Structures are given as structure tokens and as C-alpha cells.
Amino acid sequence: MRPIFRVARATFHEAWRRRFLNGILIFAILIIGSSWAFAYLQPGAELQMVIDIGLGSIRFFGMLIAVFLGTRLVPDEIELRTIHTILAKPVSRAQFLFGKYLGGVGTLAANMLLMGAAFYVVFAIKAPQFLAEKPEDAMIVAAMYSNIAKAILLTFFEVFLILGIAVVAATLFSWVLSVIFTFVFYFVGHMSDFFQQLSDPERGASKIAQIVMGALYRILPHFEIFDIREAILMGTYTPWSVMFKTIGEGVAYLVVVLLIGYLVFNEREV
Amino acid sequence: MKLYRIVGWLLAIAMLFAIHPLDQSLQYDRLVLGLRQPTPWFQIVARASGGDTELAVTGVTGVIVGAALGGFREVAASMLWMKTHEYWHKGHGTQAKALWLMRLVTLLDPHWLEPWRITAWHLAYNLYVETDDPALQAKYLQMGVECLKEGISWNPDRYDLYLELGWTLFDKVKDYEEAPKWFRAAMRYPHPEYVDRLVGHAYERMPDIPRALDAYDYCMKRNPLDQTAVGATLTIRERYLPAWDLAEQGSYDEALDAINEYLLAQPTSSLGLHVKAHIAEQAGQLRLAYDTWSLAGNLSALDFLAQRKAVELAQRLGIPVEETPQHIYMQRTGKEMKAGSPDRDRLSR
């Protein structure tokens, strides 16, 4: 385990020196901080707008950081030839890959925590002001605090999964191709419902198309499961059983992704 | 190929398929708990693509796709809403494309109440006056009502759209039997005080004097300082209750005398005429009822109830008369008012 943590720690420190990541983080915090200014675009639903921009930004910029960080973690080591020095030590390829991923997770978690904290501060300042205008929403707003924390927690696992996909993509393709692949994977993952609908025999697609669409639906990650904004907006309780199931599915998918990454990376010429 | 690779790949594929049952269970939970996205993004895109080409479909679709995938649905809804404002201020507000944009906004963000309210108002009020065809006007009324009912299905725990629907039925359709049901639904949630009084106002105009008094009584119990409810109760008791009570006892001639006495002083009183026409209907004097409803309808262009009742009675009496949108609406929705008093509980006062 020790080699994994050493690689992870080194990756974490190195990642903070990447300027583009800091740029994305600062931009994200600026957007989240100014979300209340956009709130007035939706008269009568200002708080919902703050939540949408805040959580949307955390999700969007978290995804950007995951993609651009994940696709650079391994290729940089190969390009700079530092991977030879590391692998010459008693560090296996699996340990190296997993350590890199864990370092990325640490960096991403720190970034997400900062964004989440910024959003919570904005929400805690603005919610009482909007509540003064609509006191009948008191119960909905009270439920929002815990639901927002749960939504941010689920976003953590969503971006960890994207990071895993990006790391694995980078072991397979060149940098540009792996960035494109990860973005496409993310968008297609959001379209899984679409594949399910197309695989429905009542839609009239050919038998082969039904099988292909059905297989795609089963294979692709379903990123929409990490989205609980409906519960936040409606002020309904999100049970922990659903949270655990969502996290469980995310982690299970991540294990598959990292296993594929290991199988590919283990055979790759570096 | 090395054995560990074969096992590894098989394991990865097996795990992918093993996740499926967990996913199915989770999808079911999300459906039951209402956590799924209100409208799948591809349905919104399909709707957007089928719209007016003048609206630069590609741009609009881009906004929607970006929003649906990136998580900024409310932002996209706001942008489209601003576009509807732009149309409005250009004078294209009453065109179908403005309506199409409004509909997209409600699909993107069904929990934003303003688009439901404005879209329904646009249909029931603005598009309504754009045509002189009663059948088309009735259709717009129906669309407005349906729009609000759909909005309520997305936002059942807030008073706003119940009130809006009640108000549309009260003010535009003049369905005073249906409107109080929606005002009462609004009253189940935190709401402004005037909503309570609207129930009484609806029954007063219907007219159903006992239920109106009961509604005002409720307002006064909730707030003894509610001067509107106090004033309405005094007015009803003084002006209409004597005639109503006589009619309830079956003394229709005396009841008509009593209300005529009031109408001598206030010959254009809409409520007085409504009460008189109602008593005449109960007494079986359909011609008098028709004349009275017609008079009330002619005195006020906005007294759609009187105009509708006049059409109903004219058809029963075989008098040729022009249709009204409200009458067509009631026929289409199967709610044409029956002659006489609606089925209500007899309330003791």
C-alpha cells in the first residue's frame, strides 16, 4: 500500500502546480460566488436559480478538472520519462496506476470541497433573504441544506468516475483523443435513457439495433443517477438508502473502469 | 493471451452486467421518489427541433442540450424566457411561436411557476381576444386551464397555481362551481388571506347564498378584523338573503317580489339580477330567467356567466341565439350547468 500512497502524494502535490487547474477552480468559485446576481433572471424562483447555477457549476467545472487532470496524469510521466525511474523502484504498474488515480482523486476532492464550501456560503447568505420574501417556503428551504450536501457528495462520486475514465482513456489514446473520448463518454452516459428507449421493441427498431442499444444501455455508466436536484427544488427528503445505492453503483463502475485500465496499462509499452 | 488478462476481461464484463440489477433498483427508487429529470433531454430537443425555423432552432437546441447535459436547466429556461419577453416587446407575443417557446420553458423547468402562470394567461386572456370565433376562444380557455392543471401536477405543494387556476375559472370562464374547489385546494398550503374570501365571492356570483355566507363566516372566524368578509356578509343578508330564503321555502312569487324590490333601487346590480334569474329558474319561469340573464349579460360585457346561462336557456326555449365561448367550453368539458340549484349541502345559518 505504501508505494500507492507515495505515488498518490506526489501526484497530489504536482497537480496543484498545474496552472490551468487553478484557473478553472478560480473561475468556478467566481461563478458560484456571483450566482445570486443571476438569480433575478427567474422572478419568483430566485433560490432555485442560485442552486441551479451553484450545483451546476460544481458539476460542470468538477467534470472539466477531472477530464483535463485525468488525461494528463499518466501521459506526462511517459513523456518526461519519469515513469521509468518510478517503475524501476519496487512499484508495480498496478500500484503506479492506482496511486496516480488516488492522487487525482485527492486533488479533485480538494477542488470540489472548495467549490462546495463557496456554494454553501452563498446559499447560507442568500437563503434567509429570499425566505423573507416567501416565508411559505420555509420548510422547503430547511430541507435544502441537507439535500445540497447530499447532492455535492454524489457529485464527488460522479467526477471520481469521470476521472477514472479519463485516466484509463489516457492509457489507451493520445492526449487529445483521450480528452475527446472522455467528453463523449460523459455525454453519452447522460443519454443512457435514450438508448433504453431505442431498445424498446415498441419503437420499431430492427432486432440488431435493439440488441446494440440494449447492450449500450447496460454497459454505459448512467451519470444522471448522481443528479438529485429535483429533490432539492421540491424540498423532499432523499433517503440514505438511495444515496448508498447510487454511491455503490458509482464505485462498482469505477472498479470495472480501473480494472480495464490496469489490464491495458500492464501490457502497454512505456 | 495471458490467463490473468482473459480472467480480467471476463471479470470486467461480468461486473458490468452485474451492476444492471442494482441500477434497475435505483432507477425504480428514483422514479418513485421523483428524483428523475422532469422531462428527458431528448424529448425537449425533439420538441425544440419541431418548432418555428425563424427561431434559429440550432441555437435553441444547443442551449437546451447544453443545459440538459451540463446541469444548467434553470439557466437555459431563463434564457428562453427572456426570448419570449423579446417577442412580447416586439409585438409578437400573441403568436404561436411565443407560445411554443413558453412551452419549452415549462418542459425545461417545470418547478418555475411564472412560466405556467404566464402561459395560461397568454392562452386564456391574450390569444382569446385575438379571435372572434367562439369555438377557438373556447379552445384557448381549455388550453389555459389544462396548462395550469399540468403545472399543478408538477407543483402540488404550493398554493400559487391552484389559485391561478381558480382565478382563471372565476374571472374568465365564470365557472363558479369549479373555481372554489381550486381556491380551497390553494387554502391547504400557506397562502395570502384574500384566497379565503375568493371562495365567498365565487358563491356570491354563482349565486349560492348559503355557501357564500358560510365561506365569509369562515373568513371572519379566521380573522375577526376581516372587514371585507364582514361587509360582504352584511350586504348579502340585507340584499339577497330575504329573497333567497323565500325561494328556499318554495314561495317563489314572494321571493321574486323581494329581489325586485332591491332591483328597483339598483336596477343594474349584476348580483341582484343573478339572484333573480336563479329564483326564476327554480320557479320554472324559464322565459323570465332567460330575460334576466340576457339583461345581466347585456349590461356587462364581462358577465360571461349571464351570457352563458342565457344561451343555455335560449336553447331550451328554442330561441335562436349566438354561442358564447364559455358555453362551448362548458359543453366540451361536460360541465354545462343544470337548471336550478347545484347539488350542494343545505346549510343552516
Image (cartoon, helix red, strand yellow):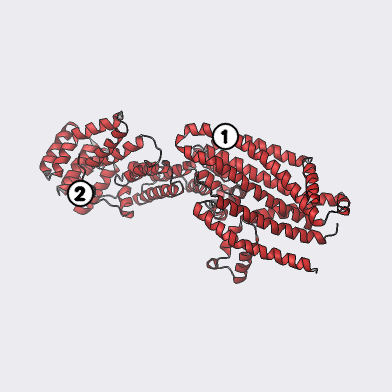
Q: Position of residue B271 (x, y in %)?
A: 23, 38
- Horizontal side of B225 relative to B153 (left or right) equals left
Visible residue check, residue B257: yes
The residue tagged 2 is B340
**Position above or below: A119 against A102:** above
Q: Residue at x 62, y 46 (%)?
A: A153
- Horizontal side of A42 relative to B11 (left or right) equals left
Label 1 and label 2: CA atoms lie apart by 57 Å
Viewer-proximal residue among B52 and B209: B209
Visible residue check, residue A173: no
Tag 2 secondary structure: loop
* Amino acid beneath label 1: Ala
Number of marks: 2
- Horizontal side of A183 relative to B295 (left or right) equals right
State the mark number for residue A52.
none
Viewer-proximal residue among B250 and A99: A99
Viewer-proximal residue among A265 and B339: A265
**Position above or below: B210 against B317:** above
> Could you say which quadrant of the image residue A127 lies in?
top right
Tag 1 secondary structure: helix
Q: Position of residue B232 (x, y in %)?
A: 26, 33
Comparing marks 1 and 2, which lies closer to the viewer?
Answer: 1
Q: Position of residue A171 (x, y in %)?
A: 78, 56
Query: What's the chain of the residue with tag 1?
Result: A
* Amino acid beneath label 2: Gly
Q: Marks 1 and 2: same chain?
A: no
Q: Position of residue B158 (x, y in %)?
A: 43, 42
State the mark number for residue A124.
1
> Could you say which quadrant of the image residue A58 lies in?
top right
- Horizontal side of A98 relative to A240 (left or right) equals right
